[in-house]
Image (cartoon, rainbow, N blue to C red):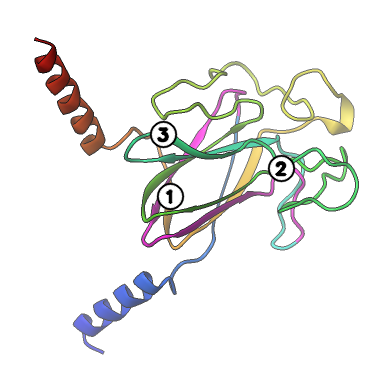
């Protein structure tokens, strides 16, 4: 197969979603105010699905339980506005955990987060934080908790509520499934230059009208 045909075939596969597959990320927070950001590109209208597995764990592929209760937020990369949120998977004791995850073997709680958002093609930013450090309304807004001292290992990352075996760790694991690409950002993403430029032009026009 010629290089031109290989390129065309690869593009057709990407456009049709044949190359799309769940992508997993993992890490460890050392501060209550830590936030991990991920850049997402949806190449066609569809659903962005995100699941965490580090609170209650997963059997296969294996993910250990014991991590903090996560908070998820999804932002439109162009406007910087929050478009979807799932701060927690629920606190049900007994039975299964819906829509995803499993009960923590020690606490008996379902605290893994699930986010499923149907939207248009484009660029988005996913934020992962420690519950109850829920995502603010915009990428330019500050989170409630600033990065501080050592991670507070309470049952849901709240210090001092439980002791002994129920203490949580700073470990996190999430899986992203979408028709597109996902990568972890090295810093705090900002709204795109185009949207900021448009906002600047609008303010300039408004100021000129006031004169």
Using the image, determine if residue 134 lies above or below residue 111.
above
Asked if residue 46 is positioned above or below residue 183 in the image, the reply reads below
Secondary structure of the residue carrying numbered label 3: loop
Distance from label 1 to label 3 (Cα)? 19 Å
Front residue of this view, candidates 81 and 107:
81
Check the picture and name the quadrant holding the C terminus. top left
Q: Position of residue 34 (x, y in %)?
A: 55, 27
**Extent of the magenta region:** 30-59
Q: Name which quarter of the figure residue 161 lies in.
A: top right
The nearer-to-camera label among 1 and 3 is 3
Apparent side of residue 126 relative to residue 31 in the rendered image (left or right):
left
Please check the rendered image and state whether residue 164 is part of the magenta-colored stretch, yes or no: no
Q: Which residue is mark 1?
A: 183
Observer-side mark, 2 or 3, equals 3
* Distance of label 2 from label 3 (alpha carbons): 23 Å
Question: How would you rate the neighbour count of disc 2 (Cα within 10 Å): few for under 14, some for 14-19, many for 20 or more?
Answer: many
| Residue 107: percent from left, percent from top | 87, 37
Magenta stretch: includes residue 50: yes
Numbered mark located on residue 89 in the image: 2
Q: Of the residues under marks 2 and 1, which one precedes in the sequence?
A: 2
Residue at x 25%, y 35% (from the top left corner): 195
Q: Which mark is residue 81?
A: 3
- Give the numbered dot on residue 133: none
- Judged from the image, the secondary structure of the residue bearing numbered disc 1 is strand
Task: Give the structural element (helix, strand or loop) at label 2.
Answer: loop
Residue drawn at x 23%, y 35% as measured from the top left: 193
């Amino acid at each position: 197969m010629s290089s031109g045909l290989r390129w065309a075939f690869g593009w057709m596969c990407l456009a049709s979603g044949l190359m799309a597959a769940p992508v997993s990320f993992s890490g460890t927070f050392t501060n209550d105010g830590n936030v991990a950001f991920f850049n997402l590109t949806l190449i066609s209208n569809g659903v962005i699905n995100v699941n965490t597995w580090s609170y209650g764990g997963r059997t296969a592929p294996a993910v250990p339980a014991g991590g903090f209760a996560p908070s998820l937020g999804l932002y439109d990369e162009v406007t910087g506005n929050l478009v979807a949120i799932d701060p927690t998977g629920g606190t049900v004791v007994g039975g299964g955990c819906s829509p995803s995850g499993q009960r923590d073997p020690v606490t008996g709680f379902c605290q893994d987060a699930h986010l499923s958002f149907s939207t248009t093609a484009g660029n988005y930013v996913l934020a992962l934080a420690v519950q109850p450090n829920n995502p603010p309304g915009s990428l330019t807004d500050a989170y409630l908790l600033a990065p501080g001292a050592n991670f507070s290992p309470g049952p849901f990352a709240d210090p001092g509520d439980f002791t002994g075996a129920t203490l949580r760790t700073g470990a996190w694991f999430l899986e992203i499934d979408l028709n597109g690409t996902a990568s972890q950002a090295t810093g705090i993403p900002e709204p795109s230059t185009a949207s900021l430029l448009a906002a600047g032009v609008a303010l300039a026009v408004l100021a000129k009208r006031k004169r």
